Amino acid sequence: MSGSLTILRAGPGMTVQDLGRPGWLEYGVSRGGAADRLALAEGAALLGQGADLAAVEMAGMGGEFQAGSDLRIALTGAPMRASIDGTAAAWNASHLLPAGARLAIGAAQSGSYGYLQVGGGFQTPVHLGARAAHLAAGIGAALAQGGVLETGPDGGRGTGLGLTPENRFEGGTVRVVASLQTALFPQAELERFEGTAFRRGARGNRMGVPLESDGEGFRPDGARTVVSEVITPGDIQVTGDGTPYVLLSECQTTGGYPRIGTVVPSDLPLLAQAPAGAALQFRFIALEEAVALEQDEAERRERLRSLCLPLIRDPRTMPNLLSYQLISGAIAGEDDVLEEMR
């Protein structure tokens, strides 16, 4: 059965996103899609559905919504304060949003992009094989107050599941592999790149994020020999002033800046979610290690459903029940407790 969700208030940069539209680079359209693709997989696991269904992506700030019918929802990505009709709702969890109920989502408490998914996915128009808004390419538009999002048939059942994700919302170490122009950078520059403590620049967006540091910029040899060529999310371009710039999901399709390296896809969610000012470090790894990491990550995503646990657990299904402190503050019942408290 299909449903609907009305937008009562929308934060800036709120869009519908899915896994994007690969295969259109030759026409000048990059893949786009969710900045944090892992969050879509987590929400899909919580709802028991495919990760290819469209969700609402919230950049730094949520909004307020009203259900036009009973909806199953999942909240993933950057943790945000959420409530349903004034009652707090857990993040990284699935919930029932009854018809007429209001869902309020506040600002991100850490990270950058939060996601609201519904059972059956959002049924916005399909363009070039995807529902994702790609504002840089003029596809779709930001969501606004008064909009109504139709939802698809929901064949799933049940809510009340929670998932504990790895912390990817405060920066950290990002693994990279050599790119087409890595050899243009002297070894000393590559070592300095690995040893530099970077900060995520405040001007980042869905196209990419600049990396700030206190040191000098990074200089390749023969940068003028680089021709404009295909670029992809994860590429780390070094601009004319030596500033590294990491491309994200809505990047352009070609570029002529030399690339010092490319972020492995499994680490892109950490980079996309890093808030402005977050500390970032980069480490080169071999291509063979990167391939193994991607295989492990793909297997882990397949297991996400098995990692979902009930928010309220049934003691009859807890094999480690006796490891919990079930009784605290027991007394013999013979003493006058009130007298002792006076």
Image: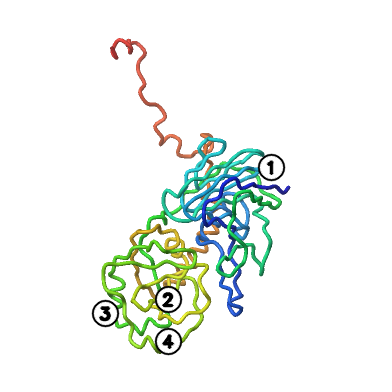
Residue 42 in percent (x, y) is at: 53, 54
Whichever of labels 3 and 4 marks the residue nearer the N terminus, that label is: 3
Q: How is the image coloured?
A: rainbow
Residue 50 as seen in the image, left or right of residue 248: right
164, 28: nearer the viewer: 28
Say which quarter of the image contains residue 125. bottom right
x, y percentage for residue 165? 46, 52
Of circles 2 and 1, which is in front? 1
Q: Measure the C-alpha gap from mark 3 to mark 4.
A: 20 Å
The mark nearer the N terminus, 4 or 2, is 4
Q: Residues within 10 Å of mark 4 (few under 14, many from 20)?
A: some
Residue 226 is tagged as 4
Q: In the image, what residue type sits under mark 4?
A: Val
- Picture quarter containing residue 17? bottom right
- SS of the residue under disc 3: helix
In the rendered image of this protein, does residue 98 appear above or below residue 117?
A: above
| Residue occupied by mark 3 | 188
Give the numbered dot on residue 69: 1
Label 1 – label 4 distance at C-alpha: 55 Å
The residue singled out by tag 2 in the image is 287
Question: Judging from the image, what secondary structure is the residue with disc 1 in?
Answer: loop
Secondary element at tag 2: helix
Q: Is residue 289 left or right of residue 45?
A: left
Q: Earlier in the sequence, mark 1 or mark 4?
A: 1
Q: Residue at x 38, y 58 (%)?
A: 276
Q: Amino acid at mark 2?
A: Leu
Label 4, secondary structure: give it: loop
- Residue that appears at 68% across and 56% down: 123
